[in-house]
Image: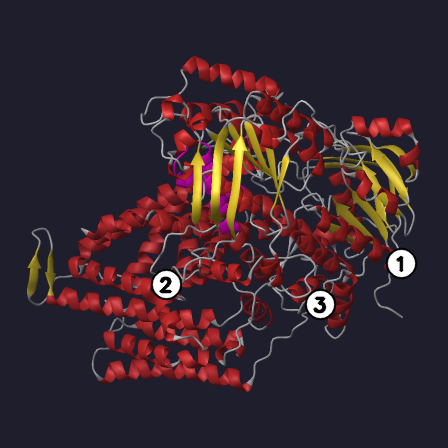
């Protein structure tokens, strides 16, 4: 008997209503719904019809104290919050559906939360990974290296391992390319068929699911169930189809009207922007002495020209470098090779003296020539009201070579009013941009790019996750832009989008040589080249490695290493003297072999601390108590032999404190450390795992930071540290909120949990502790013998 | 079976609280990193008289009060500051294991002020006090406990004084403003600070007229 089978859950709702705190109207009211065990339901409805709210309620993750909830909603006769593990929820954003750094751990996470016997967890993990077609990857494969579609399948595996009776999918494929979409859809259908569990899936693009489910349920905005019909009716009931179309749902797949009046891309007259032999990479090509080798471009030899009145769509697989190319063409990233030339029409009459490459332009000149719309609209928002947001780009634009505004005050006001009307955001002019709905945010983001009047408009996946209404409005806006002589360049997977703008396709499918280095048997290329992964590690971007260190020290338990580190640090903190610092520093260098760290690599990691130590030396020399001979008299203060000695001691100590930490943390995996802190030191598991899950987001946050910087330049702002920091905090909280839902719906925080990998203290671990103790004692003893030991905490 | 939400007190951390606090701390780590990249020159300004460098040191303290203002539960200041410290230790930009001690001491400084107000007041004055306390605690730690500095009396007073002032502004006033800004975006939906942008700066009350819109 397979352990993966589970009986389907029965859902029953009677007069169920839910109103979020501070909202004027309920999201759902008077909902009556019955879902039989094993029934597969496609849940549809207009944007804001309460679909997500219902799924969250079924997953038992809606528990706002101030919200208003009445009626009954039961799964298998119990309130969802008391049936943890019976329902599994998958959300839209792949990044927040993954909890841990290694795929095996991520799947095991839900089992551990449900306190499954550790003996049983490995087989559950294997079966779940096999069920979603990820069993060809090693269990310690880094989850960060998966494509979006693979991440969603990993999330499905995490849910299946819990053996739920109900799968709840909230637009699971909205952010995926067509290939990823089908893989996720098929994995879900297979899993549901095999396990017999019930399914409720929410999706705007109905055709993806409608032939694989039993029932179509349509929700009434702010109400209950409007229709509950057999899924087959979708193809025959014209009245239903018309109603769904009116609600903004995608009823017919890829049948958006072709804009016959728009020019095909190769017929436009004026070349606005021309690329010849362009090579691109996220990272700047500037050579840095810290970086040993130069960066290999992800894409090279790109020739492209953009002509007025035409649209071009950049298509291709995940990781092919589409967005990087877009940002480079948009003057936000520096090209690695080749030429990017702005034509005289794009530069304009007053900009004849501008350099050819947009990358060299001031942000104030860029924003009125090339507008960039980012995939996440919120990245572009920097003001607190919609109208201020639209004003900003127009106000920032300057006449090239001067500090004079491009538009007069009246012109600015006229532009803002025109755009508010055109975007149908007049009634929201004073609203905070972040509080708009998804479709409104998308419109506003395009508006902010258009506000300064750029002729070239660049967009990154503008239709991801949008309903048919927003799609149509977007096409309307972009069509107008093209008809007025502008050009549109978009990274997209959306065939309807390309057709609707009569766009020329620029396909970036990797060349055979690049394709051959794609990871073996990985269905979707995750990183285009191995080189790229190496580049990322060496970049200035902080990233946590998910791969275990195999050195002797790397194989020791984290707790032992932490204790050893504690002893050494304590010995150094306790005294300010150069001798004990020197002992620790020398020993650390001698220990490099057991950590398998090459000297050069180590030096590259620590040089910055050497610089900091010199600063500490100077600080004490100048501002510590004067004693001994005065070496340098600066009037208000002096440098004396005594203060210089003190400085050297402090500097050496500051430097030495860092070295063992670098050694230990380079060889310790954060996941293992967290396991050990929770199991052995008995720190609260909820907090330790919460911190660990957040740490995984470090690389993602750094990417957000960079993108926020690009978005500010695109909007005509220079570098704005506080605005960028605020933007990052908003994204951090948004991601965290979704991640919390993911974790809770996988049983996290409910109570007693088990551990798939028990942390143990071995004999070799004892050796590590002993070693740490010996280093600490040896350093102290030698300093005492030489009479330099100098306890800090004495007056 | 588990007892679901029934056992919760106003001071119990929910899963959202834990994950948001942790993620904020990680974001703070990235902000430190961005600060290091773009404002490296700032610290060189203080080479003339190093103890004044305390004036920008408040930058390292902001996660404490930001976490406290957003989460509004006991331990938030210490937790956020320590996780942020751990992140900067992992990024290798800080003082090794000693950074955890600093994180704890600084977080404790802010935490004590919030405790003093029984975790009921999250107004601008409390935020500034908490930021100043974090700076004071940081100054005491760096001069006496971990003793990274050994300035003469004037230097020590200048260092702790600027650290405290910097804490009050960068790690007190700014996080308070930031929390209001974040609340206005609607991002704080599942948290206790959801309505922070509508609270009066000094009384913390929400004007009645606005709540019936």
Q: Which mark is residue A474?
A: none
Q: Quadrant of the C terminus of chain A?
A: bottom left
Contact, mark 3 vs mark 2 (Cβ under 8 Å): no
Q: Main secondary structure of the magenta part?
A: helix
Q: Which residues are magenta?
A: A701-730
Disc 1, SS? loop
Q: Could you give the CA–CA distance between mark 1 and mark 2, rounded to whole angstroms? A: 54 Å
Q: Is residue A68 above or below residue A298?
A: above
Q: Residue A243, how many percent across, how many down?
A: 84, 27
Q: Quadrant of residue A115?
A: bottom right
Which of A455 and A191 lies nearest the eye of the viewer? A455
Have a look at marks 3 and 2 and say if they share a chain: no
Residue A125 appears left or right of B174: right
Q: Could you give the CA–CA distance between mark 1 and mark 3, rounded to whole angstroms? A: 28 Å
Q: Residue furthest top?
A: A410
Have a look at marks 1 and 3 and say if they share a chain: yes
The residue pinned by badge 3 equals A136
Color style of the picture: secondary structure
Q: Could you give the CA–CA distance between mark 3 and mark 2, rounded to whole angstroms? A: 41 Å
The subunit carrying tag 3 is A
Q: Which mark is residue B95?
A: 2
Residue that appears at 29% across and 65% down: A610
């Amino acid at each position: 008997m397979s352990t993966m089978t589970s009986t389907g859950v029965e859902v029953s709702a009677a007069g169920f209503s839910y109103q979020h705190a501070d909202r004027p109207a309920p999201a759902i009211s008077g909902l009556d719904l019955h879902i039989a065990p094993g029934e597969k339901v496609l849940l549809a409805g207009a944007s804001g019809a309460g679909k997500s709210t219902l799924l969250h309620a079924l997953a038992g993750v809606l528990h706002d104290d101030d919200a208003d909830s009445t009626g009954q909603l039961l799964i298998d006769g119990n309130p969802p919050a008391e049936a943890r593990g019976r329902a599994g929820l998958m959300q839209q954003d792949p990044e927040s559906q993954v909890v841990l750094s290694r795929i095996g751990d991520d799947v095991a996470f839900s089992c551990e939360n449900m306190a499954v016997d550790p003996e049983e967890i490995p087989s559950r993990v294997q079966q779940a990974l096999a069920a979603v077609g990820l069993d060809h990857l090693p269990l310690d494969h880094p989850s960060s290296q998966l494509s979006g579609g693979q991440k969603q399948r990993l999330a499905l595996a995490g849910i299946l391992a819990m053996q739920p009776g109900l799968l709840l999918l909230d637009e699971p494929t909205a952010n995926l390319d067509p290939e990823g979409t089908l893989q996720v859809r098929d994995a879900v259908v297979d899993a549901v068929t095999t396990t017999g569990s019930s399914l409720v899936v929410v999706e705007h693009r109905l055709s993806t699911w409608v032939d694989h489910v039993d029932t179509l349920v349509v929700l009434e905005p702010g109400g209950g169930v409007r229709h509950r019909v057999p899924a087959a009716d979708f193809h025959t009931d014209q009245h239903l189809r018309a109603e769904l179309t009116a609600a903004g749902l995608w009823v017919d797949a890829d049948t958006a009207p072709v804009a016959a009046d728009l020019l095909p891309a190769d017929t436009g007259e004026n070349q606005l922007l021309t690329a010849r032999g362009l090579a691109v990479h996220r990272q700047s090509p500037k050579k840095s002495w810290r970086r040993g080798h130069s960066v290999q471009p992800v894409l090279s030899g790109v020739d492209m020209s953009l002509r007025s009145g035409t649209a071009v769509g950049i298509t291709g697989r995940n990781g092919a470098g589409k967005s990087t190319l877009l940002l480079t063409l948009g003057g936000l990233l520096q090209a690695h090779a080749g030429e990017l030339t702005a034509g005289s029409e794009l530069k304009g009459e007053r900009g004849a003296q501008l350099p050819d490459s947009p990358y060299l332009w001031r942000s104030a000149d860029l924003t009125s020539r090339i507008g960039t719309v980012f995939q996440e609209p919120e990245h572009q928002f920097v003001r607190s009201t919609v109208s201020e947001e639209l004003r900003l780009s127009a106000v920032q634009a300057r006449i090239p070579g001067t500090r004079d505004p491009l538009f007069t005050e009246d012109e600015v006001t006229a532009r803002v009013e025109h755009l508010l009307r055109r975007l149908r955001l007049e009634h929201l002019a004073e609203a905070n941009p972040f509080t708009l709905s998804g479709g409104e945010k998308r419109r506003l983001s395009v508006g902010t790019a258009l506000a300064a009047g750029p002729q070239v408009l660049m967009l990154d996946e503008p239709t991801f996750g949008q309903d048919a209404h927003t799609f149509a409005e977007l096409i309307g806006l972009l069509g107008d832009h093209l008809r007025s002589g502008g050009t549109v360049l978009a990274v997209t997977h959306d065939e309807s989008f390309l057709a609707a703008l009569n766009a020329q396709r620029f396909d970036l499918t990797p060349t055979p040589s690049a394709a051959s280095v794609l990871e073996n048997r990985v269905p979707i290329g995750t990183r285009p080249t191995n080189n790229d992964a190496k580049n990322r590690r060496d970049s200035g971007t902080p990233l946590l490695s998910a791969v275990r260190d195999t050195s002797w020290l790397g194989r020791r338990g984290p707790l032992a290493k932490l204790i050893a580190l504690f002893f050494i640090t304590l010995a150094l903190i306790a005294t300010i003297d150069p001798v004990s610092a020197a002992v620790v520093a020398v020993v650390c260098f001698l220990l490099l072999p057991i950590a398998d760290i090459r000297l050069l690599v180590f030096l590259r990691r620590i040089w910055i601390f050497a610089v900091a130590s010199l600063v500490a030396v100077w600080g004490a020399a100048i501002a510590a108590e004067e004693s001994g001979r005065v070496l340098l008299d600066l009037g208000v203060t002096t440098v004396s032999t005594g203060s210089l000695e003190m400085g050297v001691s402090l500097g050496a100590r500051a430097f030495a404190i860092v070295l063992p930490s670098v050694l230990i943390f380079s060889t310790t995996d954060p996941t293992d450390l967290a396991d050990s802190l929770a199991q052995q030191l008995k720190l609260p598991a909820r907090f330790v795992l919460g911190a660990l899950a957040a740490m995984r987001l470090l690389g993602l946050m750094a990417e957000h930071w960079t993108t926020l910087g690009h978005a500010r330049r695109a909007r005509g702002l220079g570098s704005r540290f506080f605005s960028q920091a605020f933007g990052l905090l908003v994204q951090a909280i948004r991601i965290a909120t979704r991640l919390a839902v993911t974790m809770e719906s996988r049983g996290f925080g409910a109570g007693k949990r088990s551990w798939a990998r028990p942390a143990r203290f071995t004999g070799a671990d004892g050796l590590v502790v002993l070693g740490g103790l010996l280093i600490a004692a040896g350093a102290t003893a030698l300093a005492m013998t030489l009479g330099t030991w100098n306890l800090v905490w004495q007056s | 079976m588990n007892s679901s939400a029934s056992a919760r007190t106003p001071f119990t951390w929910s899963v959202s609280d834990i994950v948001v606090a942790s993620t904020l701390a990680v974001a703070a780590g990235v902000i430190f990193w961005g600060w290091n990249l773009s404002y490296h020159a700032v610290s060189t300004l203080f080479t003339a008289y190093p103890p004044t460098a305390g004036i920008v040191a408040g930058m390292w303290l902001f996660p404490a009060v930001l976490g406290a203002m957003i989460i509004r539960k006991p331990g938030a200041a210490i937790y956020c500051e320590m996780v942020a410290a751990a992140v900067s230790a992992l990024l290798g930009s800080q003082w090794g294991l000693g950074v955890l001690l600093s994180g704890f001491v600084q977080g404790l400084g802010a935490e004590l002020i919030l405790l003093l107000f029984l975790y009921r007041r999250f107004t601008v004055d409390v935020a500034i006090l908490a930021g100043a306390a974090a700076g004071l605690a940081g100054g005491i730690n760096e001069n006496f406990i971990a003793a990274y500095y050994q300035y003469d009396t004037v230097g020590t007073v200048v260092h702790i004084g600027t650290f405290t002032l910097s804490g009050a502004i960068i790690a007190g006033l700014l996080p308070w403003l930031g929390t209001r800004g974040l609340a206005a975006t609607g991002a704080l939906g599942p948290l206790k600070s959801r309505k922070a942008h509508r609270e009066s700066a000094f009384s913390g009350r929400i004007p009645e007229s606005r709540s019936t819109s």
